[in-house]
Image: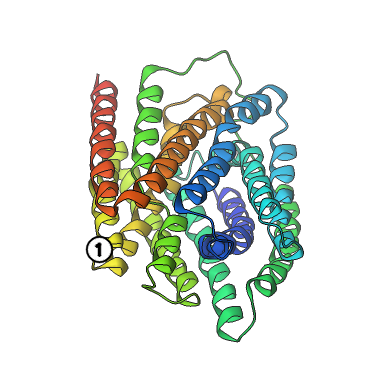
Amino acid sequence: MEKALRFVLLMGIVSLLGDVTYEGSRSVIGAYLANFGISALILGFFIGFGEFLGYGLRILFGHIADKSKRYWTFTFLGYALILSIPLIALTEYVAIVVLLIILERLGKALRSPSRDALISFATAKIGRGVAFGIHEAIDQVGAFLGPMIFFLALYLGYGYKEGFLILFIPTFLMLLFLGIAKQSYVGVEVSEVKEEKLERPFWFYTAFAIFSIAGLLNFQLLAYHFKISQIFSDELIPVLYALVMSVDAISALLIGRVYDKIGLKCLSLIPILTPISVALSLGTHPILGLVILGSIIGMHESVMRAGVAEISGAGKRATAYGIFNTGFGVGFFLGSSLMGYLYDLSTEYLVLFSLAVEAIALCFLTLLLRKIKK
C-alpha cells in the first residue's frame, strides 16, 4: 500500500509540473489568440479540434499499449511533447502557435491511456476513487501555478512570450520526476491479461461522458468572452483560471472519497451543475460560475477516470481509457465548436444548448445506473 501511494504521489508531481506548462498556456491562449484578431468561431474550432485529436487518438494508442504492454514508452513520449508549449515563445505566426498547441494535445493522447492504466494497476487495493482524487489534486497545484506565472509576467510588465519561455523549466523537471516514478512503480494487474470485451455499461458511461462535456463551456472561450467584453483585464484572466484549478483540486479530493462510498451515483452532479455554471459565467456572477466550473472539472478528471477502471477488465484497461477519452474528445470538439458558433449569435443560446445536452447526459447516466443494479 505504501509503494502504491508513493507511486501515486510521484505521478502526481509529474502531472503537477506538466500542468504548470500546459495549463499555464490554456489560461491565456484564448486572450493571446484574440490579439491575432480571430473570431470566437475559429477559436472554438481550433481549441475543440486540438482536444478532439488529444482525446480521439487515445483509442488507437490505448489499444496499442494494451497489445504491446509498452505503457511506459507511451507515457514518456506523451509527456515529452509538452515541450511544444514553451516553444510558442519562439514564433510570431498564429498557424505555428495553433500547431504547437495541437502537438501538445497529441502528446496527451499518447500518454493518458497508458498513464491511467498504470495508476489503476498500482492502486487497486487502496481505493481508485481516492487514488485518482489524490493524483488530480496534486496535478491541480500545477494548474494553479501555471496561470500565476503568466499573471506575474503580465503584472510586472513583461509579455506572453516571457511567460512561455519560463515554462521550459517545469517541463524539464517533469521529465526528471517521470524517470523517478518509473523506478518506484509496482503494478499488480499488468500480468492479468485475458480475452475480454467491453460490456454495455461501459458504452452507456462513454455516452454520458460525451454529452456531459459537450455542454460544458470551456475556459478558453470564457477567456475570450472576458477579454472581448472587457469584463476582466488581461492579467486577471490567468488568475481566474488559477481559481478554477484550485477549486478543481479540492473537488477532486472530496468527490473521490464520495465515489469510493456510493459509486457512480455521485456523477449525477455533473449534468445538474453544468448549465448553472454556463449561465452564471456568462451572466452577472462570473466568479461563482467559475467556481462551479472548477468543481465540475474536478469530477471529470478524478472519479470519471476511476469509473472506467471499475467497469472494464485489466486486459482491456488502456483500450477502455482510449475509447472513453475518444468519446470525451468528440464531445469536447462538437461542444466547443457549436458554442463558439452560438456565442457569435447570442450568449443565451449557450445556456439553452447546455441545458439540452446535459439532459441527454443525465438520461444515459440513469440507464447506466439501472444496468449496474441488475
Residue 189 in view in this figure: yes
Q: Is residue 319 above or below residue 120?
A: above
Q: Is residue 270 above or below residue 246?
A: above
What residue is shown at x 69% (from left), y 66% (from top)? 170
> Height in image: 315 above or below 224?
above
Residue 302, visible in the rendered structure: no
Mark 1 highlights which residue? 283
> 217 and 172: which one is in front?
217
> Looking at the picture, how far across and down is residue 144, in whole percent?
51, 68
**Camera-nearest residue between 365 and 100:** 100
Q: Position of residue 87 (x, y in %)?
A: 74, 60
**Residue at 26%, 47% in the rendered image:** 349
* The quadrant where residue 110 appears: top right
Which corner quadrant of the image does residue 57 belong to? top right
Q: How is the image coloured?
A: rainbow
Left or right relative to 369: residue 166 = right
Q: Nearer the viewer, residue 303 or 152?
A: 152
| Viewport quadrant of the C terminus | top left
Question: Residue at horizontal 54%, vertical 37%?
Answer: 52
Q: Is residue 60 above or below residue 87?
A: above
343 left or right of 268 in image: right
Q: Secondary structure at mark 1?
A: loop
Relative to 152, 209 lies left or right: left
Residue 183 pos. (x, y %)? 74, 49
Looking at the rendered structure, the kind of residue marked 1 is: Gly
* Residue sitting farthest toward the top: 195
* Residue found 44% across the figure and 68% down from its top: 227
79 left or right, relative to 222: right
